[in-house]
């Protein structure tokens, strides 16, 4: 963490631990639900419904003091609908990957997000250093090795994890541009979550919903698993909120480093809970991928420090809020969108 008052560091640490814990619980409950009730679209519908209810409370209560902007029709076409489609594809693909392959392997593949981010931003004209490209070697090599030695390998599961990662990579870059227009990140999450649910419901009813409603055995199973569905949806929404809250107290680079550690926590916890059978080469591949991600974030941090201008900390009370002498919020300038992957 960057130098800050001890109370702020404690707050950031609490948010980070809650983020890691909720993410691990979400993946564990998600896998458990999928094993007993393999209907990924229903899981996504319940998760989207939960995030909509929670965001409605967060945005409409004065307790959080969040100021929202009116969403115009131009906003609907320019960012709400595109982001909602990207988020929907990522959410469905993510659940399919959880259904088809172990959580540990799915998160190893999802760790390739820096690869997609670099390729997309390169196509947009942004240049990267030679060292940044070198970090892709252990990252991609580890994923290939983990795939080749995965005892429960499934092509659909791997492709779904890659599609989810690509979708969330584009979403993060796109949302970063939207946040420049002063839309609060929670409002973006609320608007896209609502449209996602409206887009998914008709397709879910056509592909899964009608059969589930008319299947007494399925209805009975849903009643039996009610608490698992509920906990999975609540923790899924919570991990996104905790991640946003954590990012609001640290820089984007610190968040990226913490995200690497989060994947280690999720992979380790899932392997311990589900007793996944792994070979030494499989573990080596996972470690290689995580090392590549850590190297990527280290180089990114170093380049960020080189490019960041030196700022003289003001002696006024503005220092506590992170406002520089020119009136700009430094923390918000480094903020980017995050999604639960």
Image (cartoon, rainbow, N blue to C red):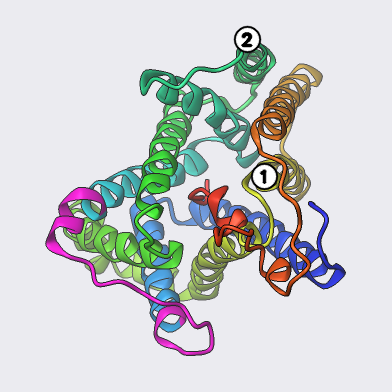
Please indicate whether residue 77 sits to the left or right of residue 239 in the image.
left
Report which quarter residue 256 is drawn in: top right
The residue sitting at 48% across, 43% down in the picture is 99
In the image, taking residue 322 as reference, residue 41 lies left or right, namely left
Indicate the position of residue 254 as horizontal and vertical percent values. Answer: 71, 46
Is 307 located above or below residue 140 in the figure? below
Q: Nearer the viewer, residue 288 or 255?
A: 255
Cα–Cα gap, marks 2 and 1 = 23 Å
174 falls in the magenta region: no
Image point 43% across, 19% down: which residue?
Answer: 122
Is residue 39 in view from this perspective?
Answer: no
Question: Within 10 Å of the Cα at label 2, are there few (<14), some (14-19), or many (20+) other Cα atoms?
Answer: few
85 or 47, which lies in front?
Answer: 85
- Residue at the farthest bottom position: 62
- Determine crowd level at label 1: few under 14, some 14-19, many 20+ residues with C-alpha closer than 10 A: many
The x, y position of residue 210, in whole percent, is 19, 62
What is the x, y in percent for residue 246?
65, 61
Q: Say which element carries label 1.
A: helix
**Residue 48 percent across, percent down from the top left:** 37, 64
Instruction: Tell me how many marks there are.
Output: 2
75 w.r.t. 141: above or below = below
Please tell me in which quadrant of the rendered image residue 196 appears: bottom left
Tell me the residue at 61%/62% (across/down).
Answer: 248
Q: Which mark is residue 259?
A: 1
The magenta span reads 58-79
Report whether residue 289 is seen: yes
Residue under pointer 2: 130
| Residue found 14% across the figure and 56% down from its top | 74
């Amino acid at each position: 963490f960057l130098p800050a008052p001890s109370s702020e560091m404690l707050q950031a640490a609490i948010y980070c631990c809650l983020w890691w814990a909720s993410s691990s619980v979400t993946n564990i409950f998600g896998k458990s639900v999928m094993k007993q009730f393999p209907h990924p679209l229903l899981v996504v519908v319940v998760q989207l419904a939960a995030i909509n209810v929670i965001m409605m409370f967060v945005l409409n209560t004065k307790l959080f003091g969040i100021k929202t902007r009116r969403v115009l029709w131009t906003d609907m076409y320019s960012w709400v609908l595109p982001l909602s489609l990207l988020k929907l594809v990522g959410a469905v693909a993510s659940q399919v990957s959880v259904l088809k392959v172990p959580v540990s392997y799915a998160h190893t593949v999802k760790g390739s997000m820096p690869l997609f981010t670099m390729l997309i931003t390169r196509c947009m004209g942004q240049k990267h250093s030679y060292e940044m490209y070198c970090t892709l070697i252990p990252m991609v090599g580890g994923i290939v090795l983990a795939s080749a030695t995965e005892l429960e390998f499934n092509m659909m599961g791997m492709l779904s994890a890659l599609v989810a990662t690509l979708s969330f990579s584009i979403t993060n870059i796109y949302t970063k541009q939207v946040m420049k227009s002063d839309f609060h990140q929670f409002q973006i999450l609320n608007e896209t979550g609502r449209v996602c649910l409206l887009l998914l419901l008709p397709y879910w009813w056509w592909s899964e919903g009608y059969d589930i409603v008319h299947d007494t055995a399925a209805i009975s199973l849903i009643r039996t698993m009610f608490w698992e569905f509920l906990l999975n949806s609540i923790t899924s929404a919570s991990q996104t909120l905790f991640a946003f809250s954590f990012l609001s107290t640290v820089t984007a680079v610190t968040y990226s480093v913490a995200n690497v550690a989060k994947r280690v926590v999720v992979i380790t916890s899932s392997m311990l809970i589900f007793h996944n059978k792994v070979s030494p080469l499989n573990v080596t591949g996972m470690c290689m991928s995580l090392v590549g991600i850590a190297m990527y974030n280290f180089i990114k941090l170093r380049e960020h420090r080189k490019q960041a201008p030196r700022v003289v900390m003001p002696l006024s009370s503005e220092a506590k809020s992170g406002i520089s002498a020119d009136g700009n919020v430094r923390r918000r300038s480094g903020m980017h969108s995050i999604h639960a992957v």
